[in-house]
Image: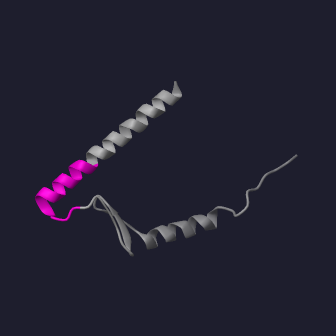
Amino acid sequence: MKIKITVILLCAVIILGAGMSVAYYNTKSFGFDENAKVVHYDDEKISFMDFDIYYKDVTGFIDRVSEIIPEKSRTVFI
């Protein structure tokens, strides 16, 4: 039963994402931008539907998380 629900939710997310991508592309290409791209990357950032993810922000986040998470897992045996 849980697998069916998971598959249904996954299909819904995929269909919603595809619909949003088509709507975004059509809106940008017809109204504002001749060279509309849903996903674009270069040496500085990754752009996805006008959201920019900069590499330096991601590496900063990974550095902060690596300071918090220990290198080896700690287990306690009694």
Q: Is residue 49 above or below residue 7?
A: below
Total label count? 0
Query: Between residues 54 and 78, which one lies in front from this camera angle?
Result: 54
Is 40 in front, or is 69? 40
Where residue 30 appears, as percent x and y from the top left, is 12, 56
- Left or right: residue 63 versus residue 42 is right
Quarter of the rendering containing residue 70: bottom right
Instruction: Using the rendered view, name the quadrant where residue 57 is placed.
Output: bottom left
The image quarter containing residue 18 is top left
Q: Answer left or right for 45 relative to 68.
A: left
Where does residue 40 sit, x and y in percent of width and height?
32, 65
Residue most toward the right? 78
Q: Residue at the location (73% across, 57% down)?
A: 73
Determine the residue positioned at 26% across, 61% down: 37
**How far from the left and from the top, in percent, is residue 50?**
28, 61
Name the chief secondary structure element in magenta.
helix
Residue plotted at (52% across, 28% down): 2
Tell me the magenta residue range: 21-36
Q: Is residue 50 above or below residue 1?
A: below
Does the magenta-highlighted stretch encompass residue 33? yes
Residue shown at 15% from the left, 64% from the top: 34
